[in-house]
Image (cartoon, rainbow, N blue to C red):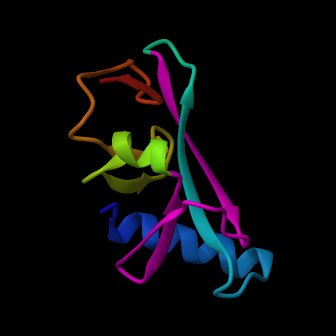
């Protein structure tokens, strides 16, 4: 399961409304190689499911990820923080053994 905090839900709904997207659009979460710790998160909106997608819905938000990324994201919670020192979207990931200082990459 991938969990969605209220802060992330609010921001996701704001983006979807601004772009004029309906409920066919969902959040795609992926883990890709990169960053100073080796792995980094990639978030995007999509409306076309792919083969072997893992689909979750929490707090009224549909989150889709591929099978490989699911291994890294299992039981993670998506948060959003704004403001001058806000990180934007970020994951609280219990699977990460370490994270870089900026919080955008991690290792397992």
Identify the residue shown where x is 72% and y is 73%. Answer: 47
Q: Quadrant of the N terminus?
A: bottom left
Identify the residue shown where x is 40% and y is 49%. Answer: 70
Identify the residue shown where x is 57% and y is 20%. Answer: 34
The front one of 19 and 35 is 35
Q: In which quadrant of the rendered view does residue 57 lie?
A: bottom left
As for residue 49 lying within the magenta part, the answer is: yes
The front one of 51 and 63 is 51
Left or right for 33, reference 77: right
Q: Residue placed farthest to the top in the image?
A: 36
Q: In which quadrant of the rendered view does residue 26 lie?
A: bottom right
Q: Residue placed farthest to the right in the image?
A: 20
Q: Residue 71 appears at what percent x and percent y?
A: 35, 43
Left or right for 23, reference 53: right
Vertical placement of residue 11 versus 108, above or below: below
- Tell me the chief SS of the magenta region: strand
Region in magenta:
38-66
Q: Residue 76 appears at what percent x and percent y?
A: 29, 51
The front one of 52 and 70 is 52
Q: Residue 29 appears at what percent x and percent y?
A: 53, 52
Identify the residue shown where x is 61% and y is 75%. Answer: 14
Vertical placement of residue 83 versus 24, above or below: above
Q: Residue placed farthest to the front in the image?
A: 51
- Count every numbered label the image shows and give the total: 0
The front one of 82 and 44 is 44
Q: Residue 58 appears at what percent x and percent y?
A: 35, 75
As for residue 48 lying within the magenta part, the answer is: yes
């Amino acid at each position: 399961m991938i969990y969605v905090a209220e802060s992330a839900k609010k921001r996701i709904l704001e983006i979807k409304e601004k772009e004029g997207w309906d409920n066919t659009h969902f959040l795609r979460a992926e883990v890709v190689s990169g960053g100073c710790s080796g792995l980094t998160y990639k978030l995007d909106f999509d409306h076309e499911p792919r083969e072997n997608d893992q689909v979750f819905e929490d707090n009224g938000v549909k989150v889709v990820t591929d099978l490989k990324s699911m291994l890294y994201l299992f039981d993670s919670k998506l948060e959003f923080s704004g403001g001058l020192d806000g990180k934007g979207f970020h994951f609280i990931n219990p699977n990460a053994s370490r994270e870089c200082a900026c919080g955008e990459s991690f290792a397992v």
